[in-house]
Amino acid sequence: MTEVQPDPTPANTAPKAAVVQPRPAPTSLHDLVMQSLDDDQALEVVSIPLEGKSSIADFMVVASGRSTRQVASMAQKLAERIKHGGFGHVRIEGLPAADWVLVDAGDIVVHLFRPEVRSFYNLERMWAFGDQGAA
């Protein structure tokens, strides 16, 4: 026979819930982009500093999504978060097919790919010149 033990917590107190700490607000456009991609579960996110390599942007961010639907969703959410974050409007190219979507946020250019398309174009290798020593 099993005995029922009395609950040691007083009846007028609720059990403590886990405390969830909110993320700090992004302080820069780069932080916002990286946080947005993390929130949307982007795969293999790479941030390439372009200072000294190109005047088109300060950073190029390359990431993958598991499907065209996820790639399109990440691009649209990213554009919305950038606008609501006060960083202005962005230009989006490639959204209808969503195999490769380019999000131009001015100082940061974001390339979102399906994995197969990303491996075909291999942008990371193209923009990594000067980062390694001579072969």
Image (tube, rainbow, N blue to C red):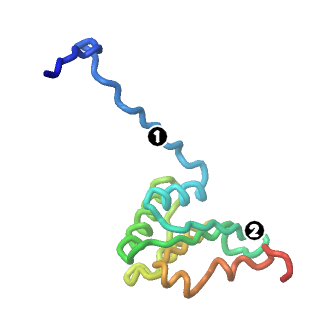
Say if 63 sits above or below 23 in the image: below
Instruction: Classify mark 1: helix, strand or loop.
Output: loop
In the image: residue 33, left or right of residue 135: left
Say if 67 sits above or below 79 in the image: below
> In the picture, which quadrant includes the N terminus?
top left
Say if 112 sits above or below 89 in the image: below
Q: Badge 1 is on which residue?
A: 22
Q: How many marks?
A: 2
User: Mark 1: few, some, or many residues within 10 Å (few <14, many ≥20)?
Assistant: few
Residue 108, x across and y down, in percent: 61, 67
Q: Work out which residue is located at the far front of the displayed protein and give it.
A: 1
In the image: residue 67, left or right of residue 85: left
Judge whether residue 85 can be spotted in this image.
Answer: yes
In the image, what residue occupies the spot 80% across and 75% down? Answer: 132
Q: Work out which residue is located at the far left of the displayed protein and give it.
A: 1
Q: Nearer the viewer, residue 102 or 87?
A: 102
User: Mark 2: few, some, or many residues within 10 Å (few <14, many ≥20)?
Assistant: few
Identity, as a three-letter code, of the amino acid under mark 2 = Glu
Q: Nearer the viewer, residue 23 or 13?
A: 13
Q: Work out which residue is located at the far bottom of the displayed protein and give it.
A: 120
Residue 110, x across and y down, in percent: 55, 71
Identity, as a three-letter code, of the amino acid under mark 1 = Pro
Instruction: Classify mark 2: helix, strand or loop.
Output: loop
Residue 103, x across and y down, in percent: 51, 72
User: Residue 49 got which mark?
Assistant: none
**Dots 1, 2 in contact, CB < 8 A:** no
In the image, what residue occupies the spot 71% across and 70% down? Answer: 50
Q: Badge 2 is on which residue?
A: 51
In the image, what residue occupies the spot 48% across and 78% down? Answer: 115
Chain-order first, disc 1 or disc 2: 1
